[in-house]
Image (cartoon, coloured by chain):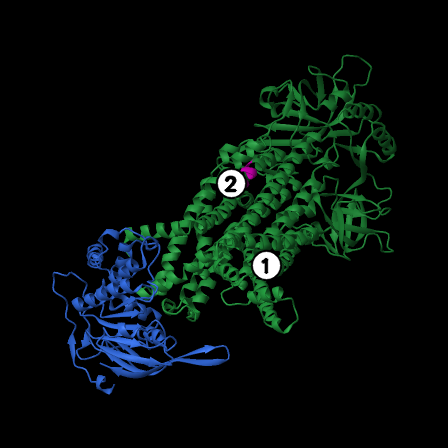
Chain colours: A blue, B green
């Protein structure tokens, strides 16, 4: 783990070629700094009269363009860990950095702004906005960043995930697999530095799940996005470059 | 977010929760309808009442004096009200005789009250003359217009000639109705109208005639009371010897009408305010429920990168747009109130269409509607901070705490805004603050009560209770149950509705009682003491009832508590206090009675309990104005003879009773032998009036009979209008309030679906589930209803006693009904909300 704590040298984050007109937020990103890293991350929940330590003293780092699977049985704290890494939850102890910025010292507003365009999410239960169409769901993060060509980019992405015919459908009119593909398009839209996926195939049947995973990894490849994937499925975890095993809240072993 | 996207988003959000959106719109619409109805009806009624009270004075302002009006008065009026129409009036007594050709017979003669008019009279209202016409047409230097009783007394008819002050006048017409003839006590005889030119032909302008000089003014532009009083001050300021003048404006002309109007206006303000608050409570609850139903979505927004503040602004904008729609609807309905009223009761509101949709009222409704909706939505929306972004990952994610500053800020804004709205509506800072403080107190009590209930319920498992009861009570305490919010909202709603019902019943009752059902229809003045038994006999002979009679002795104040009146004028009272100065110098009327008249109430001291024989009882405001208090010795000049009297009691008089009332009353026997006369009032059937007139005139030619039925009927009609409006508005507000309450309870309970599905899956029958819920709703209803109703008792008592200035005894029956209805609504609406869930197969709910 210590190998990841290298003193960084800085270089401006490269902006993509002009043909893909995506907003570019150049801020100095340490070149060798991980996309996301945590040290001694701990989360304790108070349940009634006793405490429950869900995540215990976890260190990890995910490099740019790297994919990491967090593997473990249910109750091992992997989803909680994911939430902590994304700033969706606050740790009881420890530190988390995304693109070199320390999350534990930020307030809710700063965390929200950080998430815009930097992080993309794919959830087990899809978490689409039910009152918006597929196209509008994908547009939301783009519009949040003030991106001018949001509609075009959203249409393009939905085409890439094979939903060109479903642009104006509502989530209630889509199947599980289709909803997850919309979620993928939404997650990748703003070209985030990091995608966080929590059991992305958990609510899908095997065949649909496979297709969704293919899409996920293909898109990741094209964009060079880092990926942290939480799953209990060992086979799924094999598709990632590294795997972190968790049990009872602790990081047990890391394998390549 | 981009504009177009925002609009689409809002439309979608609305469509997705049509029920809630509609309820929000309706809540605001009802509140705004109440505000606009009140404002538009109030201006309609005010206009009607104003035209009536002006008629009672026959002008807007009357400036009078016992001495010729000062020369600088004209200039002062020119300066203050250059466009005002003026009429100069002189009133004096004179003997009037029928000119007869017969030699040797003494001409029949009578003391009459002359009213010499220079200019248009009356400036408001009209005299009913027979044959029809106006004074301007009928009065020439050679003609007069007289009251029918004078003609009867003298045996004259129209066309005959009267001898007045040495000149002859032809009778041109009879005056059947004089709208401004209300000062009964000062009447000396029947009325004769004469022109200025006619007066100059007589020898009446000599020495020794007691003349009352008046300047009547009709001011342009319908000023409100405050503006008229300012005008009075301005005019008096421009006159050097202003303490010799007395000015009255038409609002003071008839106390009964004035008080009725003031009370009505206050009541209207209360109704509007409470309805608005009720609408706000409905908005708060529906926003809370809405947000509660969108928790998952809010978490996704947070996850995608919206800050809580941005999410709040989205919801707030949404609420504002819906509130705007509701305000427009409410203003449209409320503004039509005068029109509807005039269709429903054409003789009560004849000018309905003119007064509908007054722009001021509509604007007020729109602003208050959107403002109050926003104010009440804000605290509910701070729950946006509570939604943890981690909810997207974990359903049991712990709710976050909103920043203290945000919570405090939203509550502060709510209270400040509510106080401002209350101030705008009630026009008195004190009432606004009192209202908001009252709401806070009751809201606080409800909050504490709910907390107490939850604490009590926490002990429930240790008690031996039937399982259904145990579970229901425990369910109250579960997180996310919203019990506290439900209790506070239902309790405040009950408070509002019950207060409305209590105040409405008390006020309408009072207005009904004030209607002159028992008020006299005839007054008789100048009855000599020895004539009274005979006159009384005549009254009884025509079947009169409510016969009241009081003696009158005229006197002047000489000294109060050792200080002479002159000293008092110079030292004790500032020169600006003209009304009080006039009270000191004018002629006073003293009476006596053994028992306190019905319309009087002793508020200090005791009536005739002192062993001293010369006790005096003063009306409280009169005593304050002349600077007298209990125990003071007041010296009177009774027709040249000094009499010392001691103040031993103070009275409060209900002037609306239309009975004969006196500021000054002495102990029977104290003014034994003093020269005076009697006043009498009685109620007789209209057919009997002429008979009484003939009989009395024949036997007692010096007695004047005044028929006041027409005037009292007008006043009675006014008060009937007010009572009607009170009932209608109160009823409307109560119905609307109940509707909002029902919706509020429903909104809070729509989340039961999942719970019901789970219960059914676990094997509970619908009947059992209903029982479970019923206990929950019953407990909430009882707690909220009890605290709300008790609070309503306090609110209603405070309003009626302090604002309306009436003795208050709120109806306990209504209080109990309030509690009952709250409980009933809570159970009914709660079950209705769960009804849909009860009939849905659980699978469908659990799958989604």
Q: Residue lying farthest bottom?
A: A2
Q: Which mark is residue B768?
A: 1
Query: Please, what is the dominant secondary structure of the magenta stretch?
Result: helix
Residue A250: image quadrant is bottom left
Q: Which mark is residue B40?
A: 2
* Nearer to us in this view, B798 or A202: A202
CA gap between label 2 and label 1 equals 51 Å
Question: Which callout, 2 or 1, points to the residue nearer the camera?
Answer: 1
Asked whether, in this view, residue B308 is left or right of residue B190, the answer is left
Residue B382: image quadrant is bottom left
Q: Residues within 10 Å of mark 2 (few under 14, many from 20)?
A: many
Residue A77: in sight, yes or no? yes
Give the residue displayed 32% in from the left and 50% down from the top. Answer: B7
The residue segment tinted magenta is B41-47
Give the residue displayed 24% in from the left and 82% down from the top. Answer: A255
Decide: is B400 above or below B829.
Answer: below
């Amino acid at each position: 783990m210590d190998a990841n704590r290298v003193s960084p040298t800085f270089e401006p984050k490269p902006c993509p070629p002009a043909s893909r007109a995506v907003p570019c937020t150049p801020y100095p990103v340490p070149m060798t700094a991980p996309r996301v890293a945590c040290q001694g991350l701990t989360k304790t929940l108070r349940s009634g009269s006793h405490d429950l330590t869900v995540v215990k003293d976890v260190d990890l780092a995910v490099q740019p363009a790297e994919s990491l699977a967090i593997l473990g049985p249910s109750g091992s704290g992997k989803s909680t860990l994911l939430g902590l890494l994304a700033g969706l939850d606050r740790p009881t102890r420890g530190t988390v950095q995304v693109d070199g910025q320390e999350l534990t010292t930020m307030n809710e507003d700063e965390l929200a702004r950080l998430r815009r365009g930097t992080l993309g999410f794919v959830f087990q239960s899809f978490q689409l906005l039910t009152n918006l169409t597929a196209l509008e769901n994908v547009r939301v993060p783009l519009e949040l960043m003030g991106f001018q060509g949001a509609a075009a980019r959203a249409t393009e992405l939905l085409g890439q995930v094979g939903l060109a015919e479903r642009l104006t459908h509502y989530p209630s009119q889509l199947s599980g697999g289709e909803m997850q593909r919309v979620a993928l398009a939404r997650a990748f839209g703003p070209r985030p530095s990091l995608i966080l996926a929590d059991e992305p195939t958990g609510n899908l049947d095997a065949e649909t799940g496979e297709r969704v995973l293919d899409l996920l990894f293909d898109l990741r490849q094209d964009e060079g996005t880092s990926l942290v994937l939480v799953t209990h499925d060992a086979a799924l975890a094999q598709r990632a470059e590294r795997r972190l095993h968790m049990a009872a809240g602790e990081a047990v072993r890391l394998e390549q | 977010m981009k504009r177009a996207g925002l609009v689409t988003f809002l439309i979608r959000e609305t469509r997705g929760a049509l029920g809630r959106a509609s309820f929000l719109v309706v809540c605001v619409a009802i509140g705004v309808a109440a505000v606009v109805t009140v404002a538009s009806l109030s201006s309609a009624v005010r206009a009607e009442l104003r035209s009536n009270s002006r008629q009672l004075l026959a002008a807007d302002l009357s400036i009078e004096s016992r001495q010729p009006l000062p020369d600088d008065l004209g200039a002062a009026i020119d300066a203050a009200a250059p466009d005002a129409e003026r009429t100069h009036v002189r009133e004096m007594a004179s003997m009037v005789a029928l000119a007869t050709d017969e030699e040797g017979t003494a001409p029949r003669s009578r003391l009459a009250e002359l009213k010499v008019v220079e200019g248009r009279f009356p400036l408001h209202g009209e005299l009913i003359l027979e044959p029809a016409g106006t004074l301007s047409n009928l009065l020439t230097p050679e003609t007069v217009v007289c009251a029918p009783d004078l003609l009867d007394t003298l045996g004259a008819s129209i066309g005959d000639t009267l001898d007045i002050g040495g000149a002859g006048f032809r009778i041109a017409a009879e005056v059947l109705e004089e709208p401004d003839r209300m000062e009964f006590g000062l009447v000396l005889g029947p009325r004769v109208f004469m022109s200025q030119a006619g007066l100059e032909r007589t020898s009446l302008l000599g020495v020794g005639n007691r003349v009352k000089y008046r300047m009547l003014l009709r001011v342009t532009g319908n000023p409100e009371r405050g503006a008229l009083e300012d005008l009075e001050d301005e005019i008096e300021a421009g006159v050097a010897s202003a303490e010799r003048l007395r000015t009255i404006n038409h609002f003071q002309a008839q106390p009964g009408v004035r008080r009725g109007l003031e009370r009505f206006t206050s009541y209207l303000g209360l109704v509007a305010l409470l309805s608005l608050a009720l609408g706000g409570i409905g908005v708060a609850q529906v926003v809370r429920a809405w947000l509660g139903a969108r928790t998952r979505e809010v978490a996704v927004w947070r996850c995608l990168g919206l800050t809580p503040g941005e999410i709040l602004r989205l919801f707030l904008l949404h609420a504002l747009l819906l509130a705007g729609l509701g305000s427009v609807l409410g203003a449209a309905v409320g503004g039509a109130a005068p029109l509807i009223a005039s269709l429903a009761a054409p003789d009560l509101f004849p000018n309905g269409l003119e007064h509908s949709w007054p722009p001021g009222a509509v604007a007020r409704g729109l602003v208050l509607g959107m403002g109050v909706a926003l104010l009440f939505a804000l605290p509910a929306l701070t729950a946006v901070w509570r939604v943890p972004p981690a909810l997207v990952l974990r359903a049991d994610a712990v709710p976050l705490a909103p920043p203290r500053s945000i919570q405090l800020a939203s509550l502060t804004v709510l209270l400040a805004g509510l106080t401002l709205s209350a101030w705008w509506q009630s026009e008195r800072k004190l009432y606004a603050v009192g209202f908001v403080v009252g709401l806070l107190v009751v809201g606080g009590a409800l909050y504490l009560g709910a907390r107490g209930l939850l604490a009590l319920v926490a002990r429930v498992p240790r008690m031996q209770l039937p399982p259904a009861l145990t579970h229901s009570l425990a369910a109250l305490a579960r997180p996310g149950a919203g019990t506290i919010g439900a209790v506070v909202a239902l309790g405040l709603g009950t408070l509002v509705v019950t207060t409305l019902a209590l105040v409405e019943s008390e006020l309408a009752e009072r207005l009904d009682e004030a209607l002159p059902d028992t008020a006299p229809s005839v007054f008789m003045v100048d009855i000599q003491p020895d004539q009274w038994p005979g006159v009384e006999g005549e009254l009884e002979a025509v079947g009169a009832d409510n016969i009241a009679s009081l003696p009158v002795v005229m006197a002047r104040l000489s000294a109060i508590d050792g200080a002479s009146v002159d000293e008092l004028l110079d030292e004790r009272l500032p020169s600006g206090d003209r009304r009080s100065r006039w009270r000191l110098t004018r002629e006073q009327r003293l009476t006596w009675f053994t028992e306190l008249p019905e319309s009087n109430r002793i508020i200090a001291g005791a009536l005739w309990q002192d062993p001293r024989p010369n006790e005096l009882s003063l009306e409280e405001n009169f005593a304050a104005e002349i600077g007298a208090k209990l125990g003071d010795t007041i010296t009177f000049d009774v027709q040249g003879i000094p009499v010392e009297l001691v103040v031993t009691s103070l009275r409060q008089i209900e002037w609306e009773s239309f009975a004969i009332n006196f500021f000054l009353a002495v102990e029977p026997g104290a003014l034994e032998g003093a020269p005076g006369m009697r006043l009498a009032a009685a109620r007789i059937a209209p057919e009997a009036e002429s008979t009484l007139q003939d009989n009395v005139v024949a036997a007692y030619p010096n007695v004047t009979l005044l028929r006041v039925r027409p005037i009292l009927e007008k006043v009675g009609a006014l008060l009937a209008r007010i009572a009607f409006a009170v009932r209608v508005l109160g009823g409307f507000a109560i119905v609307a309030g109940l509707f909002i309450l029902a919706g509020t309870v429903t909104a809070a309970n729509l989340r039961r679906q999942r719970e019901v599905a789970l219960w059914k899956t676990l094997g509970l029958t619908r009947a059992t589930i209903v029982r479970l819920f019923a206990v929950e709703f019953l407990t909430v209803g009882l707690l909220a209803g009890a605290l709300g109703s008790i609070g309503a008792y306090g609110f209603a008592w405070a309003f009626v006693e302090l604002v309306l200035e009436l003795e208050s005894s709120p109806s306990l029956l209504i209080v109990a009904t309030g509690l009952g209805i709250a409980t009933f609504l809570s159970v009914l609406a709660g079950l209705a909300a769960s009804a849909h869930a009860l009939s849905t197969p659980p699978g469908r709910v659990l799958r989604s």
